[in-house]
């Protein structure tokens, strides 16, 4: 897992869209005893969802957030290879 995945997702989004599109990671608790936390990263333009990424689940809240953010950040890096999103 990437250290600071949430920050990298936020910084990459800022670099690409300069605040016009924002990043968010939603997290919620479930009743699954093995993976009680779920998270989903999204790109938003105002209140409109531009892109949803796959949900992640984990036994810890921060881990679920990090997995979701890393998934989104990895997608951004692949989708926009001409931008330096690795060093954000």
Image (cartoon, grey):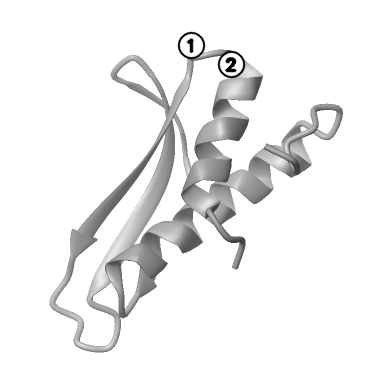
Q: Quadrant of the C terminus?
A: top right
Nearest to the observer: residue 86 or residue 31: 86
- Relative side of 21 to 64, left or right: right
Judge by depth and name the residue closer to the eye, 77 or 79. Answer: 77
The single residue placed furthest to the right in the displayed view is: 82
Q: Residue 12: where, in percent of width, then height?
A: 62, 32
Please state the horizontal and vertical placement of residue 81, each as a whole percent of the image: 83, 34
* Residue drawn at x 66%, y 45% as measured from the top left: 75
**From what the image shows, is residue 21 above or below residue 61?**
above
Count of residue discs: 2
| Location of residue 33 in the rendering, given as x and y in whole percent from the top left corner | 19, 87
Residue at position x 30%, y 64% in the image: 38
- On the question of residue 22 being in view, the answer is yes
Quadrant in the rendering for residue 34: bottom left
Q: Which residue is mark 2?
A: 17
Mark 1 touching mark 2, by CB under 8 A?
yes
In the rendering, which numbered label is found on residue 20?
Answer: 1
């Amino acid at each position: 897992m990437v250290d600071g995945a949430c920050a990298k997702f936020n910084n990459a989004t800022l670099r690409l869209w300069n605040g016009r599109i924002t990043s968010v990671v939603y997290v919620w608790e479930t009743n699954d005893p093995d993976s009680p936390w779920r998270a989903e990263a999204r790109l938003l333009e105002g209140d409109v969802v531009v892109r949803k990424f796959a949900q992640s689940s984990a036994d810890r809240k921060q881990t679920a957030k990090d997995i979701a953010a890393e998934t989104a950040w990895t997608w951004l890096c692949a989708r926009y290879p001409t931008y330096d999103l690795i060093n954000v």
